Image (cartoon, rainbow, N blue to C red):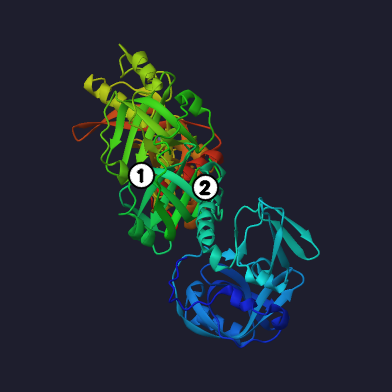
């Protein structure tokens, strides 16, 4: 915290002047401090005390506001909305109290006056009364001065209150005296004009010590909400300003991110929102080394990735430590190894682009493969808009997130980087393995035998159309999410004849139903489902029809049972069945709609799978996608 010499703040040690005489006695000396912290506590039945700290820019000292002072600070905090942490107050009536229980001094404030606000960072150390007020103890210090030419050893004695700051490395303690051997004394500073030069040296030494003592924190040992860390690292990636939706205000706002690499080649993401963005966006440069302080550390519980959210009070200064590496560590896994990993694992990948599925500004989706298998990759958000994807290109990714849902996929996240270094052994190996192979067919599942996705179904249908095979009926197994179950006109009165099962016509005048084909009548025929649905997967969607038995299997209820329910209950049933992922057997036929031949999909079987588990996974995935699109980032 930088406070100028004309700053209105007093020094913390002034509170402890003549401590022996003043302890527990009311003081009226007007001293000014900045406040830090606000904690309301109840004392007894109706007395409120406020715990806070007084700070002078260098030290902080705990304090309690009580009585009138507590009432007043509550007004400032709760009614005038003044940030307590920037308040400067003048003490009017106060005292120093010693808390036996805590073995510590605290300042009890009865009356104060609000002076104004002072912004700045808090880098204060806790004031230690015993260390800083040694004068109270009146120790005698004796410095033995050896004279090497003669054996006269002269002694010089000081009362400790004339000593400003002494670093004592070799001393002995006898009868309330320190005996310091001058020859062994490393550096001592006496408050004596003759020692001014030494004093300055000591200051330099202190400064140096301070820098060395300000131990650098490695990313590997950082933990959430860690205090007092200092990180030195290189910015190996700096994003443009990106959009996100602030959950509090529901407004689109901007942020930018950096990836910091430390001396151990570990990485951490740094995020800058609002004021931090304005302060640091133009200052920070990719490739440079900085020391970072005073940001909030967070960690993803699922995969351990760490991030720092910086604010406008964060301290970032350029560092000259050019020894910090410039490339992150890469620990590649094969795609097959990845498939066995837990949901949300973070992985590094070398793979070839086989198919580009989506290439828009908000999402790039493509299939990659390596020597082991295929997986789909999705890069989310505007930051990837300018990346030019090419079929057959070898990509190197650091920090993709693996979604172990039924659509296994690799997704970009804050820490994801596309690595440009193609001299890597893994790249060379993949390149030589690829030589002479047909990229289009490697690892592709055979669509005739296995479950296919909806895009493959589409390709299959187009192939049939092109070959003019529109008379034949085909069957395919697909995976998909059933969405948009048609809620109205989804059932019909069914002719009881098992061979007919046609729709019966209602004859209201005779309160009965009639089958036009069989010419039979029935006053209460069974109702049968003809449920139109949309089936979607990650690539596309199709419209399909589900007939009675399968619809009963899907909904867990017969058409007659559903009919008997209230509209609201019906709706709840449909809602609860949406977004379930199913394996389905689909019948494909072609129909002529006014001269246009179109495929008609009829779901002939739904394979019983754990609906609940899969629905949860599906929702989880949609949540995450939303998150990745920066729509749900919470400030
Ligand atoms: Zn009939």
Checking the image for residue 216, the label placed there is: 2
Q: Residue at x 24, y 24 (%)?
A: 465
How far across and how far down the image is residue 325, in percent?
Answer: 42, 36
Q: Nearer the viewer, residue 24 or 496?
A: 24
In the displayed structure, would residue 151 be above or below residue 331? below
From the Cβ of disc 2, is ligand 1 less than 8 Å away? no
Residue 431 on image: x %, y %: 34, 17
Q: Earlier in the sequence, mark 2 or mark 1?
A: 2
Task: Locate residue 248, reporting x and y percent.
Answer: 43, 63
Q: Tell how many labels.
A: 2
**Residue 241 visible at all:** yes
> Which residue is denoted by mark 1 in the rendering?
288
Please report the residue visible at 55 percent of the width from the left and 47 percent of the height from the top: 222
Q: Is residue 367 above or below residue 543?
A: above
Residue 20, percent across and down? 72, 79
Judged from the image, the quadrant occupied by ligand 1 is: top left
Is the residue marked 1 within 8 Å of ligand 1, measured from its CB?
A: no
Q: Name the side, left or right, on which 85 lies relative to 70.
A: left
- Looking at the picture, tell me which residue is in the foreground, 536 or 346: 346
């Amino acid at each position: 915290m930088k406070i100028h010499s004309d700053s209105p703040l007093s020094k913390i040690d002034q509170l402890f002047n003549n401590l022996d005489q003043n302890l527990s006695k009311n003081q009226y000396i007007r001293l000014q401090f900045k406040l830090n912290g606000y904690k309301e506590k109840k004392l007894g039945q109706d007395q409120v005390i406020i715990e806070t700290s007084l700070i002078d820019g260098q030290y902080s000292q705990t304090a309690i506001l009580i009585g009138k002072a507590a009432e007043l600070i509550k007004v400032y905090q709760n009614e005038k909305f003044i940030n307590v942490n920037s308040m400067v107050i003048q003490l009017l009536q106060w005292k120093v109290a010693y808390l036996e229980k805590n073995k510590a001094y605290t300042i009890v404030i009865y009356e104060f006056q609000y002076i104004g606000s002072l912004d700045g960072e808090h880098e204060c150390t806790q004031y230690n009364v015993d260390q800083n007020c040694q004068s109270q103890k009146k120790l005698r210090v004796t410095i033995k001065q050896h004279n090497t030419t003669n054996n006269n050893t002269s002694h010089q004695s000081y009362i400790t209150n004339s000593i400003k700051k002494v670093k004592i490395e070799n001393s002995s303690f006898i009868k309330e005296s320190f005996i310091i051997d001058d020859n062994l004394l490393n550096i001592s500073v006496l408050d004596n004009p003759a020692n001014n030069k030494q004093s300055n040296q000591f200051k330099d030494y202190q400064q140096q010590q301070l820098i060395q003592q300000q131990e650098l924190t490695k990313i590997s040992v950082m933990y959430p909400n860690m205090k007092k860390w200092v990180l030195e690292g290189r910015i190996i990636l700096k994003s443009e300003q990106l959009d996100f939706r602030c959950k509090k205000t529901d407004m689109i706002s901007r942020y930018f991110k950096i990836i910091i690499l430390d001396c151990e080649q570990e990485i951490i993401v740094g995020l800058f929102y609002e004021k931090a963005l304005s302060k640091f966006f133009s200052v920070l440069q990719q490739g440079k080394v900085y020391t970072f302080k005073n940001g909030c550390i967070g960690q993803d519980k699922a995969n351990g990735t760490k991030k720092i959210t910086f604010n406008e009070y964060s301290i970032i200064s350029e560092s000259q430590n050019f020894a910090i590496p410039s490339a992150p560590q890469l620990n590649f896994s094969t795609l097959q190894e990845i498939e066995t990993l837990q949901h949300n694992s973070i992985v590094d990948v070398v793979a070839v682009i086989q198919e580009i599925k989506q290439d828009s500004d908000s999402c790039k989706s493509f299939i990659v493969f390596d020597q082991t298998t295929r997986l789909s990759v999705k890069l989310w958000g505007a930051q990837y808009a300018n990346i030019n994807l090419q079929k057959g290109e070898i990509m190197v990714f650091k920090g993709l997130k693996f979604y172990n849902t039924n659509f296994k996929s690799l997704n970009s996240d804050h820490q994801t980087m596309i690595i440009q270094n193609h001299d890597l052994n893994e790249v060379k190996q993949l390149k030589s393995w690829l030589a002479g192979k047909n990229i289009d067919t490697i690892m592709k599942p055979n669509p005739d035998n296995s479950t296919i996705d909806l895009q493959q179904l589409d390709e299959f249908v187009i192939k049939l159309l092109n070959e003019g095979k529109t008379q034949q009926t085909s069957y395919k197994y697909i995976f998909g999410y059933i969405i948009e179950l048609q809620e109205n006109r989804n059932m019909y009165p069914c002719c009881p004849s098992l061979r007919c099962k046609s729709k019966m016509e209602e004859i209201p005048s005779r309160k009965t139903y009639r089958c036009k084909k069989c010419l039979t009548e029935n006053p209460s025929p069974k109702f049968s489902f003809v449920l139109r649905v949309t089936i979607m997967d990650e690539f596309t969607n199709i419209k399909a029809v589900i007939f009675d038995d399968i619809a009963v299997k899907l909904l867990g209820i017969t058409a007659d049972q559903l009919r008997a329910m209230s509209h609201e209950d019906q709706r709840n049933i449909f809602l609860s069945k949406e977004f379930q992922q199913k394996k389905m057997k689909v019948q494909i036929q072609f129909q002529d709609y006014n001269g246009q031949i179109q495929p008609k999909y009829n779901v002939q079987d739904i394979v019983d799978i754990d609906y609940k588990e899969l629905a949860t996974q599906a929702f989880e995935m949609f949540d995450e996608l939303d998150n990745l699109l920066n729509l749900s980032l919470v400030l």
